[in-house]
Image: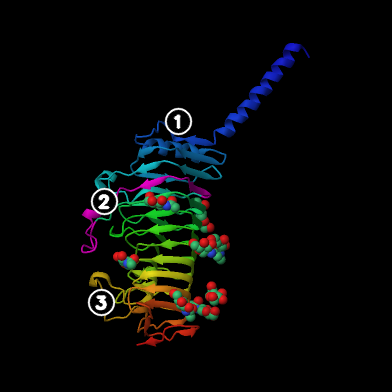
């Protein structure tokens, strides 16, 4: 072999080595390389970065660095070639304050049809809700236009949301639909107590969702579980202000799927309208079952209805209360619930006269109202009790 030939082989090998190095580095997709700059609009930059990250054959990561950015609605979808995609946001991203600018998008940051997705970082997604809250008439107008939610996670498996904050959404903060093994860990949700319909995390038709170590302060339910959910865990969550942690409302529509296997553990609920609640509509077609609901180790501070099953849920009198709810509730435990109630009737178990609740257990319920033990009101249910528990009155 000539010296020249040897050298060219060495140079070739060097280029191959550098080339593979560059390719593995290319798994990072910084929006700055797509024209996304602080104080600018990153709608296109993020969408393009997603397209490339999704098409990559390695695990890929999209970066939104420190800084303040504007962004309109994005719809980031799979299926992706990349075995996993992380979106790391360390900056502050703001939605248009004027709801009309979102052009009717149901969700501002919509992510779907992916596997092994992670949303991470120390950043904040600010929905800039105040103008939309002012215009919201949904409480009186059932045909109102629902404003845009901050996040939609749709048809996603084996994924995480951690670290980031969702702030001042115009509507629900997060909607989780048809996801499997989806984890929120160290997430943060914040909106004022008087902001309408700003539910924290709503979960529907999903299996294996965990909401852990999350702080939720908002104007509506902190966590709400719609129909078709199973194997849902809410653990180490702080809720307040807000309307508490709810299963339901259910039964308003006739095509709903059952709800089962829900665990709410080690949570603190403060200054809220409800604590832990199951709510179903009367006078409506829905006839599913709700079973295996377990609420344990919950601390209530100044909560209006700390423990509540309400099968006569009928906001703004939009239903016929003369026909009972058709939803059958069974296998429910409320265990180790303590703290303070804002009302004397701290335990309300109002089950359906059509299908009474079965196997409801109350264990160690130590709730006080003005220093005295709360009372319990029960209808169409005979709870089994252990430990200190307020006695049922009809
Ligand atoms: C998620 O899991 C469901 C159920 O196993 C499957 O049907 C669906 O294709 C999966 N979706 C993705 C994006 O991997
Ligand atoms: C949650 O978000 C609020 C509002 O942005 C902020 O004040 C608070 O520090 C955040 N908490 C955490 C734990 O990130
Ligand atoms: C319940 O969800 C967890 C993930 O949160 C998952 O690991 C487990 O397999 C699920 N169990 C069933 C029975 O689907
Ligand atoms: C329960 O929650 C508290 C406060 O959030 C936390 O410090 C503690 O580690 C949690 N305990 C368990 C067993 O998860
Ligand atoms: C009790 O909670 C209500 C909201 O439900 C709040 O307005 C009030 O300030 C709270 N009281 C205390 C003493 O924290
Ligand atoms: C309620 O629990 C009992 C005992 O664990 C079980 O046999 C029954 O199937 C459960 N009912 C429902 C509707 O899950
Ligand atoms: C409830 O509290 C009792 C007494 O503090 C404790 O022994 C038990 O393990 C707790 N149960 C649950 C399910 O946390
Ligand atoms: C109930 O809680 C209070 C403090 O909130 C405590 O002093 C009392 O010992 C508790 N009672 C029982 C039976 O655990």
Closer to the eye: label 2 or 1: 2
Mark 3 and mark 2 lie on one chain; the one further toward the N terminus is: 2
Q: Which residues are magenta?
A: 115-144
Asked if 14 appears above or below 231 in the picture, the reply is above
Measured as percent of width and height from the top left, residue 102 is found at: 29, 45
Asked if 96 appears above or below 146 in the picture, the reply is above
Alpha-carbon span between mark 3 and mark 2:
34 Å
Measured as percent of width and height from the top left, residue 111 is found at: 43, 48
- Which labelled disc corresponds to residue 320? 3
Disc 3 on helix, strand or loop? loop
Badge 2 vs badge 1, beta-carbon distance below 8 Å: no
Residue under pointer 2 = 130
Residue under pointer 1 = 33
Mark 2 and mark 1 lie on one chain; the one further toward the N terminus is: 1
Mark 1 and mark 3 lie on one chain; the one further toward the N terminus is: 1
Quarter of the image with the N terminus is top right
């Amino acid at each position: 072999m000539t010296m020249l030939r040897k050298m060219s082989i060495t140079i070739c090998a060097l280029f191959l080595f550098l080339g593979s190095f560059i390719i593995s580095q290319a798994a990072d997709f910084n929006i700055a390389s797509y024209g996304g700059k602080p104080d600018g609009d990153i709608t296109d930059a993020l969408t393009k970065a997603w397209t490339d990250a999704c098409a990559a054959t390695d695990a890929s990561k999209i970066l939104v660095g420190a800084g303040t950015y504007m962004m309109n609605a994005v719809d980031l979808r799979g299926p992706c070639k990349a075995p996993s995609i992380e979106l790391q946001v360390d900056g502050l991203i703001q939605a248009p304050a004027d709801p009309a600018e979102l052009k009717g998008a149901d969700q501002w940051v919509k992510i779907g049809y992916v596997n092994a997705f992670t949303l991470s970082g120390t950043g904040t997604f600010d929905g800039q809700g105040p103008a939309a809250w002012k215009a919201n008439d949904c409480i009186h107008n059932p045909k109102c236009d629902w404003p845009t939610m901050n996040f939609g996670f749709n048809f996603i498996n084996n994924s995480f949301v951690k670290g980031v904050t969702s702030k001042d959404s115009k509507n629900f903060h997060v909607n989780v639909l048809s996801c499997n093994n989806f984890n929120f860990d160290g997430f943060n949700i914040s909106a004022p107590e008087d902001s309408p319909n700003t539910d924290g995390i709503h979960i529907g038709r999903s299996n294996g969702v965990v909401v852990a170590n999350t702080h939720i302060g908002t104007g509506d339910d902190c966590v709400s579980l719609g129909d078709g959910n199973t194997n849902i865990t809410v653990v180490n969550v702080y809720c307040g202000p807000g309307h508490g942690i709810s299963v339901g409302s259910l039964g308003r529509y006739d095509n709903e799927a059952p709800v089962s296997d829900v665990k709410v553990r080690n949570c603190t609920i403060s200054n809220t309208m409800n604590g832990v609640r199951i709510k179903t509509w009367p006078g409506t077609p829905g006839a599913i079952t709700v079973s295996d609901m377990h609420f344990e180790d919950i601390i209530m501070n100044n909560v209006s209805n700390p423990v509540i099953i309400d099968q006569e849920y009928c906001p703004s009198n939009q239903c016929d209360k003369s026909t009972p709810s058709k939803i059958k509730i069974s296998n429910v435990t409320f265990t180790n619930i303590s703290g303070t109630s804002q009302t004397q009737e701290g335990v309300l178990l109002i089950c359906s006269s059509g299908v009474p609740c079965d196997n409801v257990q109350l264990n160690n319920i130590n709730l006080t109202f003005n220093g005295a033990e709360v009372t319990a009101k029960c209808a169409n249910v005979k709870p089994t009790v252990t430990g200190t528990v307020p006695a049922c009155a009809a």
